[in-house]
Amino acid sequence: MAHSRESDARTILKSVFGYEDFRPGQWEVIAAALEGRDVFAVMPTGSGKSMCYQLPALVAGGLTLVVSPLIALMRDQVGQLTRAGVAAASLNSMNSESEAAEAWDRLNAGELRLLFVSPERLAGEGLVARLRRLGVTRLAIDEAHCVSQWGHDFRPEYRLLAKTREALGNVPVTALTATADRQTREDIAQQLFPRPPHLVIHSFDRPNLKLAFAPKDQPRRQIADFLKVHRGGSGIVYCSSRGRTERLAEGLSEQGYRALPYHAGLDQGLRNRNQDIFLQEDGVVVCATIAFGMGINKPDVRFVVHADMPGSIESYYQEIGRAGRDGLPADTLTLYGVDDMALRRRQIDEKAIDEERRRIEHRRLNAMIDLCESALCRRCALLAYFGEETPSCRESAAAFRCDLCSSEAVLADATLDARKLLSAVARSGQRFGAAHLADILTGTLSDTVKRQNHDGLKTFGVGQDKPRSAWTALTRKLFAAGALAEASAEHGGFRLTGKGEDILFGREPITVRADPHADRRRSRGGREAARADGLDEGTAALFEHLRRLRLEIAREEGVAAYIIFTDRTLIAMARERPLGLSAMRAIEGVGERKLSQYGEAFIEAIAGFPG
């Protein structure tokens, strides 16, 4: 029976979705779901989580109710499934009357295999009882971290899903998330399942993502340098404030990028329009706050930039996870500075939360700061946070190394310089910022130094052997290490901590990472980086030709370009150049419905392409 189920699943995987085999971790989740077991799967973005509830719905039949947190995500998935020939619909506030009526007609007729709803809609009057009468056979909960108070996207309505499950007749549940540390996983399992579920934790590693961090040094220039090698690619630049998203989008537009802002303060219509343009077209850059979140199911995002440091590793991992969902190479860059660190610490201290929660949030922030200042492999440090051990990029011969493995980052004893800087902090009254401290140490007679008579301090000029930038960088590192703290929430500046006093008075040494040289940071490769997909000139030209055809079809049908075919599928077409339906059928991502709808058009485009 089990063998028959797997055979049926593989047949549907190929005929409907166009895939020859399961991705790592998928079959374990699907098999458990087909056995009627409760399953909790933690799998990275891009590993094919949605297939883990879509395929059981088609193999076993019946109606699968899918809880999804965002309307855009639901509509996107329904669009993809419908084009693959799957009977799917959603019930949401964006439905027209005719769409809602059609969905209910198909539900009453027993035609639908997947129904997508939001947790808020399920919490409304009568819907769950009506669905129970129709006979829901399983419940799938996407973005399950929303149920946990420790998750970064907590949604109170998700807490009601255990009652929804009971009201539906205790149907089996498949819960999925890409991001959950041990504490969040335990909370999710406790909230959603009456008994321990079958737990599947797949590797958190995203080997196709290049991880890079850099201290802030003219951030707009740093972002512009990074984007130069990504022209024509889709990407997201995350910013910590609404105003910054608009200013950055305007600046990038002036440089010739198609850049759009996105934040919760924008008019709803404009926000939806900007999101739709990003989702549906190629080569768009969105400058966004974290409001641009879970609903981003676009597989061909080629880069994610953080213009400001994220507040936790969970948030960072979730946000970079929006890049490279198609498994092709994608690039990330995170900029960080002492102001980011101070702001994040202040935000936690000012929250109306209990001390235990505050302690945990500080621990999570410190882990993010450690990742920024790490001298070890970024991938190792990131995965270690989620309890996973892995060899460094260098040891594993990874094709897409992190910046530290690429640049041979080194640790250096900074105790002597740290004592000079901490002495300057103490002697100047423990209330000045990094720029003023650098002026004191380098012997710079600024107006503030003269006004405060700090040119008479013993530490004035003791650091003339180093540039100001080295001292401001060391201030950031000492703050990150907990040797300095913010002197005043209102005025900023730095004061010594107990650890800082221990270093100053010789009771404790300190080691820091030597920053890479600025010119090395700016060098991000030329043609090779721009053609990160590894395509030769002829194949790349055909790929772009097929992208243009895809966009024409998508615009005619009013859907996102990748719903027709993903970049990965178009690249396979450009490489293999199929000139008949049987050859096209062998291309990954071409199922029977899409073959009949679009196969001839793409074969014709390939046949007519010169070269």
Image: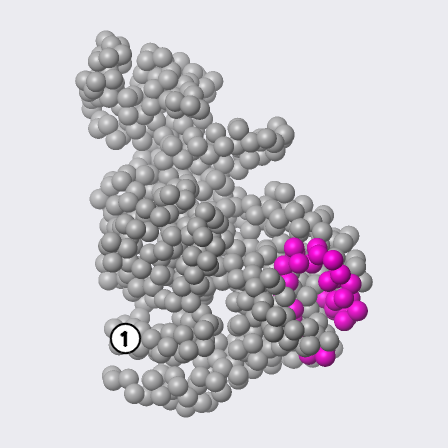
Viewer-proximal residue, 451 or 480?
Answer: 451
Residue 147 higher or lower than 104, as above or below: above
Q: Is residue 327 visible?
A: no
Residue at the spot 38% in from the left edge and 32% down from the top edge: 339
Per the image, the residue denoted by label 1 is 541
Residue 113 picture location, percent across and down: 67, 74
Residue 116 higher or lower than 397, as above or below: below
Q: 5 left or right of 94?
A: right
Viewer-proximal residue, 157 or 309?
Answer: 157
Residue at the spot 24% in from the left edge and 16% down from the top edge: 449
User: Where are the magenta residues, as a range?
Assistant: 109-138
Instruction: Indicate the quadrant containing the N terminus: top left, top right, bottom left or bottom right.
Output: bottom right
Q: Is residue 102 magenta?
A: no
Residue at the spot 33% in from the left edge and 75% down from the top edge: 548
Viewer-proximal residue, 44 or 323?
Answer: 323
**Res 172 → quadrant:** bottom right
Residue at the spot 39% in from the left edge and 86% down from the top edge: 601
Residue 570 picture location, percent across and down: 39, 75
Q: Of the residues shown, which amino acid type is indicated by label 1? A: Ala
Q: 227 left or right of 288?
A: left
Residue 274 picture location, percent across and down: 41, 59
Q: Is residue 119 magenta?
A: yes
Q: Is residue 1 visible?
A: yes
